[in-house]
Amino acid sequence: ERNDFVDGENVAINVLNAQGSSGNLHDMAQQLADESDLLLGISTSAAQALASVTDDIPILFTATTDPKGAGLIESVDAPGGNITGTSDMVPFEEQIELLISIIPESEKIGIIFNSSEPNSQVQADLAVEAIEMSNREAVIMTVTNTNDVQQVAERLLSEVDALYIPTDNTLSSAATTVGELAIEHQIPIVAGSIDHTADGGLATYGMDYYSLGQQTGKMAIDILKNETL
């Protein structure tokens, strides 16, 4: 279903990809704001960059775990301003329960994520609470880029009984690497994303990002048709 919009005919879609480099986001956001009637930021950092360059152009966010905490909206029920969108907050309590049910005798549960990704930090904090409520120890190790993942994951997997991975762009890119290491160490992984189960994650209750994108697209169509959030 095209909803009367066809790229190149009656709508122009300009896609810029920072390729994981947050230093590029502000300049890219400004470029898009100079050229666009509607803006979409995928991830918290991208949405924040867009929000920093315009108070007027409608902005949508997606794959943003805690939009209120990130300063993007006033509340979920009443976003306010020129920004709205879709969140990828996962059912972290159920995910931790699932991981513990897979290995009930677990004592230490590892968490690995990129410390510079706000979404991941939020999820990790919530996961730690759930792990500690289950009378188990959370062991946290962080990375700063994909080059760190193999060494850090190897060290973490040697210390824990199970591994939890939030929805994290860096870990998603290195999912196969971590998955292979987990198999070697015989450590089960529950990840935030359903996609991660195809690359080494054992199981999860997670987010379908394709459906999330579709929902965000429907919101974009409504804004373009009605010219209002």
Image (cartoon, grey):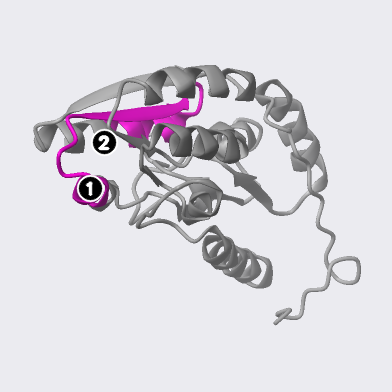
Label 2 CA crowd tier, 10 Å (few <14, some 14–19, many 20+): few
Secondary element at tag 1: helix
Q: Which residue is mark 1?
A: 93
137 horizontally vs 48: left or right: left
Residue at left offset 64%, top offset 49%: 40
The answer to whether residue 106 is magenta is: yes
Q: CA distance from mark 1 to mark 2?
A: 8 Å
Residue 203 in the image: x percent, y percent? 38, 54
Residue 109 in the image: x percent, y percent? 26, 31
Q: Split into 4 quadrants, where in the image is the N terminus?
A: bottom right
Label 1 CA crowd tier, 10 Å (few <14, some 14–19, many 20+): some
Question: Which stretch is magenta?
Answer: 97-125
Dot 2 amino acid type: Leu
Residue 86 in the image: x percent, y percent? 48, 55
Q: Are marks 1 and 2 in contact (CB under 8 Å)?
A: yes
For the question of whether residue 218 can be seen, the reply is yes
Residue 212 in the image: x percent, y percent? 52, 61
Quarter where residue 56 is shown: top right
The answer to whether residue 114 is magenta is: yes
Residue at left offset 10%, top offset 36%: 133
81 in relation to 186, above or below:
below
Residue at left offset 22%, top offset 47%: 93
Residue extending farthest right: 9
Q: Which residue is mark 2?
A: 126
